[in-house]
Each structure stands twice: as C-alpha cells, then as structure tokens.
Amino acid sequence: MTTLLDYLHTRRSVTAKALAEPGPDNTQLETILTIASRIPDHKKLAPFRFLVFEGDARDQFGTVLSQAYAAENTHLDKTEKSYQAVLEHEQNRFNRVPMVVAVIASPIEHTSVPEWEQTLTAGAVCMNMLHGIHALGFSGQWLSEWYAYNSQVHTALELAEHENIAGFMYIGTKTANPKERARPDVAALTCYWQAKNKT
Ligand SMILES: Cc1cc2nc3c(=O)[nH]c(=O)nc-3n(C[C@H](O)[C@H](O)[C@H](O)COP(=O)(O)O)c2cc1C
C-alpha cells in the first residue's frame, strides 16, 4: 500500500520530447488499454474508443498534420524558413515517440446518462491510461494541442460528428526524469459545506 501511495503522491507525466524507444509491444498495449477501460462508467456505456498510431502510421499522420496546418495558415509566407520548419515539425510530431493512442470520446444517446458524464468517463480513461503506462515501466503525456480541435484532422481520422478527441496519449520510455511542478493548494480549494440557515 505504501508503494501505491508513494506512486500517487509522486507520479509525473514525461514530455513527449523526453520519450524514446522502446514503446509497448502488442501484449503490453493490450494491458494498457484494458487498464484504461477499467473506469467508472455510468450504465456501462463505454462512450470512448481508441486509435493507435505506431510504425508508419505516425508518419502518415504527420502528413495529415502538415496539410491541415498549411490549410489553416494560407496567409503565411510559404517560402519563409520558419514556415518550412513548422511543416517539418508537424510531419515529425508523432515520429518523436514510439506510440500515440488517441482516446476518442464517443458519447451514446441515453435517456438518463447526460453527455457530460460520458465526457468525464473519457477523461477518466485518459488518466487511467497514464497509470497503466507507468505501471508497465513506461512514461506518457496527455496532450491535445491544436490538432485535437481541427476539423480536417477529425475528417482524416474519420471521427463522427458527435465525437471528440479526449487526448492524444504519447507513450515511450523516459530519457530524463521530470522535475516536480507546482501543485494546487488543496486546502484553498476545499471547504466543508453547511446549510446557511441552520434551524
Ligand atoms: C485534456 C488535457 C490536454 C492537455 N493538452 C496539453 C497540450 O496540448 N500541451 C501541453 O503542453 N500540455 C497539455 N496538457 C498537460 C500535460 O498533460 C502535462 O504534461 C500534465 O499536465 C503534467 O501533469 P502531471 O505531471 O501531473 O501528469 C494537457 C492536459 C490535459 C488534461
């Protein structure tokens, strides 16, 4: 129990640029996705799905990203070095890490489970995926960035109209230990509720 407590008190994400090979193999990925799916889910709707990017698919998605970036920024000077550098960065975005899993929030029409609750479930999937990644000795980062909200990217990924990207989960082996970052002052965020007009 101390180990679990220690882990929960100290765990940190590792930035994508500090993630390298190796990534999970197929069996380890299955474990990660199984752990990610073991989350509170009102009425067991499973309002989420996964898209895995590994191997060549990372570079193919890079082409989607660079084209979407170019389409969004037609006002920029294409001959500028900085523009070409950004396109190259977009092309190589996923190549930086062994694997990326997109968690797609895929809400289901339901009479008693509002979409908001289903969105929370998709968020819990992302968080549990980080736990699974770390439990297997890998590291990860939960990112959205501009392309989570880009319609051209949604089309390329064949997202339905009602679907959204809850997160792109970058997965790999850390090359450096992350520094601690400031954490919320829990006491300042917490109060004990009491009725205003006590009788
Ligand atoms: C939904 C969501 C989207 C995020 N998108 C980004 C992002 O686009 N860029 C970024 O630098 N960090 C982003 N982050 C934050 C990173 O995941 C960051 O590494 C994390 O907050 C570190 O916290 P931890 O060390 O407690 O895991 C996002 C976090 C969440 C929850």
Image (tube, rainbow, N blue to C red):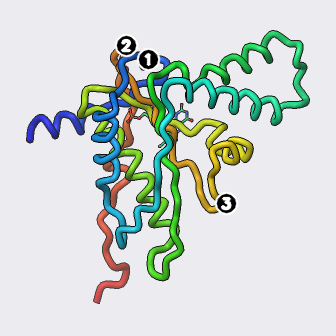
Q: What's under tag 2, amino acid-wise?
A: Thr
Give the image location of residue 187, x and y in percent.
31, 49
Tell me if the residue at label 2 has its CB under 8 Å from ligand 1: no
> In the rendered image, which quarter contains the C terminus?
bottom left
- Residue 93 in percent (x, y) is at 59, 23
Pointers 1 and 2 in contact (CB under 8 A)? yes
| Residue found 32% across the figure and 70% down from its top | 193
Above-or-below relation of 103 to 67 = below
Mark earlier in primary sequence (1, 3): 1
Binning the other alpha carbons within 10 Å of mark 3 as few (below 14), some (14 to 19) or many (20 upward) gives: few
Q: Quadrant of residue 192?
A: bottom left
Q: CA distance from mark 3 to mark 2?
A: 38 Å
The residue that label 1 is drawn on is 18
Few, some or many residues within 10 Å of mark 2 (<14, 14–19, 20+): some
Write down the residue under mark 3. 161
**SS for dot 3:** loop
Looking at the rendered structure, the kind of residue marked 3 is Glu
Give, as a three-letter code, the residue at label 1. Answer: Ala
In the image, which disc is placed on residue 69?
none
- Please state, as top left, top right, bottom left or bottom right, where the N terminus lies in the image: top left
Q: Residues within 10 Å of mark 1 (few under 14, many from 20)?
A: some
For marks 1 and 2, give the CA distance: 5 Å
Label 1 close to label 3 by CB (< 8 Å): no
- Which residue position is annotated with label 2? 175
Q: Is mark 3 within 8 Å of ligand 1?
A: no
